[in-house]
Image (cartoon, helix red, strand yellow):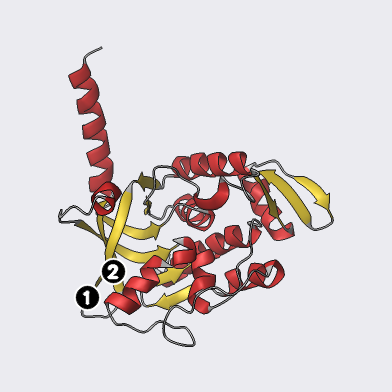
Amino acid sequence: MDEVIISKAIIDSYTKDLHDVMEIQVAIAGAGPAGMCAAYYLARNKVKTAIFERTLSIGGGIWGGGMMFNKIVVQDEGKEILDEFGIDSNQYQEGYYVASAVELASTMCSKVVKSGAKIFNLFDIEDVVIRGDNRVSGLVLNWSPVTSGHLHVDPLTIRAGMVIDATGHSCEICQMVTKEMGETLRTPTGKTMGEKAMWAEAAEKCVVENTKEVFPGLIVAGMAANAAFGSPRMGPIFGGMLASGKRAAQLAMELLNI
């Protein structure tokens, strides 16, 4: 085997994929449960979609389950999505289903890629693009090692019809819009309100209800939705986050008239 041909194959195929997503319909920040679920339902409906994930691994908080016990719990609505993905689950008691965190993360990743969505790991989102129409219309990207290394390296930009903030507890894209851009979100305070204490029952409902277009061109999903609207966190129950991702996909398609 020729090492140079191997290197060329990697560079050529990767740069082609990256070039293809310079202009897309939906860009998703974060490859956790909500972001991957959104990507799956979008790509399955032929929506040109890409996820940009900061870390090396895909799956967000799925892998650790609850306190590093790699099991997760979903309710009835979440089980329907697990079944659709072909992920095994066992009923613990009525309304509570247990699944393998490893199977959930790995199967979702595979399904997302096979649906046609692109996943780019080790990408840091430095900023959003807001033009004269005062809506989010793209993302400013850099390598995450550049950011962690505090290197002065200029980023690149993509254009997107819609952006989904699925960055989890930190709600990073919404924070950029308010803190860096000085814009107002469609929340009660106009800003990200932060999570409240853990309350699984309330949080599971809120995470779907809070999945909204929080600023023109920007949808918030998963734990980022609860962080944006000041709702409780829920711990290692994942059904609401999966349902939020599915809802984010539906909303993006409605807003893009797809």
Q: What is the x, y in percent for residue 42?
A: 46, 56
Task: Indicate the quadrant containing the C terminus: top left, top right, bottom left or bottom right.
Answer: bottom left
Which label sits on residue 131? 1
Q: Residue furthest right?
A: 94
In the depicted structure, whether residue 96 falls above or below residue 57: below
Q: Nearer the viewer, residue 125 or 26?
A: 125
Which label sits on residue 137? 2
For the question of whether residue 211 can be seen, the reply is no
Bin the neighbour count of mark 1 within 10 Å (Cα to Cα): few under 14, some 14-19, many 20 and up.
few
Which label sits on residue 23? none
Q: What is the x, y in percent for residue 180?
A: 28, 75
Mark 1 and mark 2 residues within 8 Å of each other at the beta carbon: yes
Dot 1 falls on a residue whose secondary structure is loop
In the depicted structure, whether residue 86 falls above or below residue 162: above
41 relative position to 116: left or right? right
Amino acid carrying label 1: it is Arg
Residue at (49% x, 53% y) in the render: 32
Q: What is the x, y in percent for residue 77?
A: 70, 60
